[in-house]
Amino acid sequence: MICLSMYASFFPLHLKHSDPNFIGTGKYYVDFSRGYCIKDLDEVNCPSNQVCQRNTAYNTKFYPDIISCCASLSSYISKPYCEASGSYTNYWFSYGGGNICKRDCNPNDNDVDGSVCANGADGTTKLYESANDCCEDTTFGLGTNYCRATSVGEVCTD
């Protein structure tokens, strides 16, 4: 019975996951259809700042935290996007084909720091920690100062 012993560790977990009273493991797994990690927990017990969904698949790999789960994704998925579980990252991205960068944050939170929030980043969007980094990497033709001025309301100096 080598075959049975080889897969024995999957059976208890699968049986536990198929139990309708089981609330979940509390660990994270990759949801490839969404492009980010989700906490394996039912919605009733889900913290308000996280995305949760029970996983009933017997062959799912679980991670102890969202950071290690997101680190397991391919390099084409943005880690800040993954770690935010598809919510706002507060990172910057090129908007409208270049020459302006916007912060990936709730549009209702505009002008927190003079920046304009936009909801437009996804798992494949290149994200930057600052407007300056975004402007230096993505501007075309009009220049970095124009980008900074329109992105965060700075005054152009040249």
Image: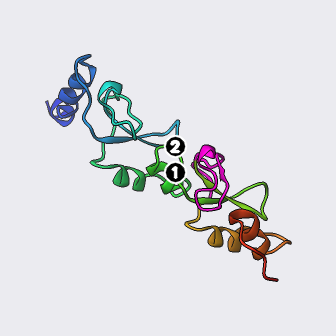
Check the image and report above or below for 37 versus 111. Answer: above
In the foreground, 123 or 99:
99
Which numbered circle lies on residue 86?
Answer: 2
Check the image and report above or below for 14 versus 148. Answer: above
Check the image and report above or below for 124 versus 147. Answer: above
User: Distance between the Cα atoms at labels 2 and 1?
Assistant: 6 Å
Which residues lie in the magenta part?
106-126
In the foreground, 128 or 60:
128
Give coordinates of residue 21: x percent, y percent: 22, 18
Kindly identify the amino acid type of the residue bearing the numbered disc 2. Gly
Which residue sits at x=63%, y=72%?
Answer: 133
- Mark 2 nearby-residue class (10 Å; few <14, some 14–19, many ≥20): some
Q: Could you tell me which secondary element the residue under label 2 belongs to?
A: loop
Return the residue at label 1: 81
Q: Residue furthest top?
A: 20
Q: Is residue 120 magenta?
A: yes
* Mark before the other along the chain sequence, 2 or 1: 1
Which numbered circle lies on residue 30?
Answer: none
Give coordinates of residue 14: x percent, y percent: 25, 26
Instruction: Say whether marks 2 and 1 touch (CB < 8 Å).
Output: yes
Kindly identify the amino acid type of the residue bearing the numbered disc 1. Tyr
When asked about the image quadrant of residue 92, the answer is bottom right
- Mark 1 nearby-residue class (10 Å; few <14, some 14–19, many ≥20): many
* Relative to 101, 81 lies left or right: left
